[in-house]
């Protein structure tokens, strides 16, 4: 495997003393797991943040070998990881993507949608500007993986309406898409749902 392409960094797992096993979503190859030497070191620590856009150079001698990756930061989501609501949203969509997509199966529509959603989370003036895109991404992911998901309305006007849709999708995500996985991936969604709910009740 040899691939040089933009990628969305969606997850990392510590490996050895300083390395990480990264999960990267690319448009051409889909989700790719790769070994990143020094991923927990001072230089790369700001790069291996979920949601970051990186230039990835991924190489493996054979299809059965875990590839090695060299990463260069293109766009950082780090500044938004200190803000509770955007941080929760980024954590959820990246964890969902990393946990559910099969490796090395391209999903160009999901790649484009996730990139647009992350941009909206980071740059919209408020959650109203991205909660509709969040609902649309969950539905698209369910549909791409063969779990239905239904049709999203062409316009979601406020956070309260988005919460209705998020609540509708919860059971399908938890009992069909994520039920077989170890670890509480849905915990990230629960935290996001609570924070969005507080935003609605306080207005």
Image (cartoon, rainbow, N blue to C red):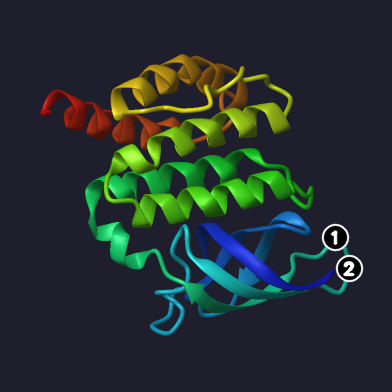
| The residue positioned farthest toward the bottom in the image shown | 43
The quarter of the picture where residue 184 lies is top left
Residue at image coords 46%, 15%: 168
Seen as rendered, the residue at the extreme right is: 62
Q: On the rendered structure, is 143 left or right of 116?
A: right
Residue 8 percent location from the top left of the image? 57, 60
Q: Is residue 192 above or below residue 15?
A: above
Disc 1 on helix, strand or loop? loop
Residue carrying label 2: 62
Instruction: Give the left or right position of residue 103, taking residue 10 as reference.
Output: right
Residue 67 on image: x %, y %:
74, 69
Reading the image, the residue beneath label 1 is 64
Residue at position x 47%, y 58% in the image: 51
- Depth order, front residue of 166/194: 166
Q: Are marks 1 and 2 in contact (CB under 8 Å)?
A: yes
The N terminus - image quarter: bottom right
Quarter residue 61 falls in: bottom right
Rounded to the nearest whole Å, what is the CA distance between mark 1 and mark 2? 5 Å
Left or right position of 40 against 70: left
Residue 72 in picture, x, y percent from top left: 56, 80
| Front in this rendered view, residue 19 or 202 | 202
Relative height, residue 16 to residue 131 (above, below)? below
Q: In percent of the image, x 50 and y 19: which residue is there?
A: 169
In the displayed structure image, the side of residue 142 where residue 93 appears, left or right: left
Could one spot residue 124 in this view of the protein?
A: yes
């Amino acid at each position: 495997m040899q691939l040089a392409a933009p990628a969305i960094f969606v997850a990392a797992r510590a490996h050895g003393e300083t390395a990480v096993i990264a999960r990267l979503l690319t448009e051409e190859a889909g989700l790719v797991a790769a070994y990143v030497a020094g991923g927990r070191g001072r230089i790369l620590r700001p790069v291996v943040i979920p949601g970051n856009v990186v230039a990835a150079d991924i190489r493996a001698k054979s299809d059965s070998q875990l590839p090695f990756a060299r990463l260069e930061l293109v766009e950082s989501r780090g500044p938004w990881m200190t803000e509770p609501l955007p941080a929760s949203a980024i954590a959820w969509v990246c964890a969902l993507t990393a946990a559910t997509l099969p490796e090395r199966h391209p999903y160009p529509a999901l790649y484009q949608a996730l990139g647009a959603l992350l941009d909206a989370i980071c740059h919209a003036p408020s959650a109203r500007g991205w909660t509709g895109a969040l609902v649309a991404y969950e539905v698209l992911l369910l549909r791409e993986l063969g779990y239905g998901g239904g049709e999203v309305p062409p316009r979601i006007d406020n956070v309260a309406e988005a919460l209705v849709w998020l609540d509708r999708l919860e059971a399908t995500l938890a009992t069909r898409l994520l039920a077989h996985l170890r670890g509480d991936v849905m915990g990230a969604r629960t935290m996001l749902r609570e924070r969005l709910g507080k935003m609605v009740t306080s207005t």
